[in-house]
Image (cartoon, helix red, strand yellow):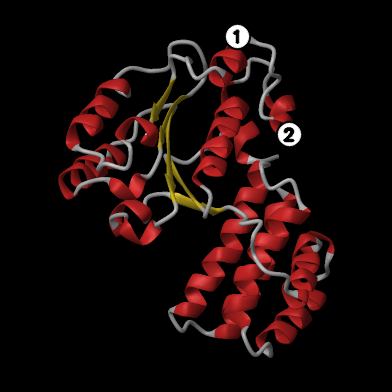
Amino acid sequence: MGAASSGRIPNAYLFAGANPQSLLDEAIFFAGVLNCSAGPGSVREGGCGKCESCDKIKRRIHPDVLIISSSVRQGKSIKIDEIRQISSFVRFGPALSRWKLIIMEDADLMTEEASNSFLKTLEEPHKNVLFILLTTRETNILKTIVSRCQKIMFPNMEVKADDSADQLADKLTGAEKMSIPSLLALSDELSALPDLEGTLNSAIYKYGEKVDYRQEKKYVAVREIFEAVRSLERRANKRLTLDNMLLSLKEVEKD
């Protein structure tokens, strides 16, 4: 059972990808999953689409879903006044549904003052309040904010064809069915790839094409792969990083 249906939700997510509209669509989809009156059974469809909560989320008038919109700012910075709006919004619990959600488009446009103020809000989590930050430029977000979010990478459908990445994605989607010796053998095979980091990066997108990554456990699986890439970029032990990634993928799918 994924976190969305079990209630094990983190304080904040960071949705990162190349397409801003897709990121917003996914955030609204997730809001539907969390607040649908039909409950956990609607996870695969992003809510039942029929209840009052789903209807209001779809029309973007839900009292418990605040969208800090990039279209309103037209590319301008997110200033501290908008962060104060968020602080006021989260002061009280949900009015209609189980969760209050704050979706921030172009989170990388926060000014330094706004970033520091928002960090204080993150450091004092409120019950049943979830932040979803959207960005196409993660490196422009304060590192201490990123460290407090569960980061999810979303597929870029314009990624070039890569047979190695495609084959790897096939293997990763089947990780939960592989035995431990088979996983370790795969780790050994991957460690010999000439461009391991590049292949893993491409496999993240391919993985998203092959599975219903909108399910919560698929969010976590993509994050595990992405974190492995980050570790390799920091020159972590290659074999240990791959072993941990594959074993984590197996455990994610069992939850």
| Relative to 236, residue 156 above or below | above
Q: Is residue 125 above or below residue 47?
A: below
Q: Give, as a three-letter code, the residue at label 1.
A: Glu
Looking at the image, residue 39 sits to the left or right of residue 63; the answer is: right
Q: Earlier in the sequence, mark 2 or mark 1?
A: 2
Q: Is residue 59 above or below residue 162?
A: above
User: What residue type is disc 2 on?
Assistant: Arg
Secondary structure of the residue carrying tag 2 is helix
The residue at which mark 2 appears reads as 44
Give neighbour class at mark 1: few <14, some 14-19, many 20+ (Cα, 10 Å). Answer: some
Q: Which mark is residue 52?
A: 1
**Mark 2, residues whose alpha carbon is within 10 Å: few (<14), some, or many (≥20)?**
some
Q: Residue most toward the front?
A: 74
In the displayed structure, 103 sits above or below 229; it is above
How far apart are the alpha carbons under marks 2 and 1?
Answer: 19 Å
Residue 189 picture quarter: bottom right
145 relative position to 120: left or right: right
Q: Is residue 172 left or right of residue 121?
A: right
Residue at 75%, 66% (x, y): give it.
Answer: 169
- Left or right position of 211 against 80: right
Regarding mark 1 in the picture, which secondary structure is present there?
A: helix
| Residue 122, percent from left and from top | 31, 41
Q: Decide which of 84, 11 is in the foreground and name it.
A: 84
* Percent x, y of residue 9: 52, 38
**Mark on residue 112?**
none
The residue drawn where x is 82% and y is 76% is 182
Tell me what residue is drawn at x 66 percent, y 47 percent.
217
Residue 65 % position (x, y): 45, 23
Q: How many marks?
A: 2
Q: Position of residue 161 (x, y in %)?
A: 73, 70
Residue closer to the observer: 114 or 186:
114
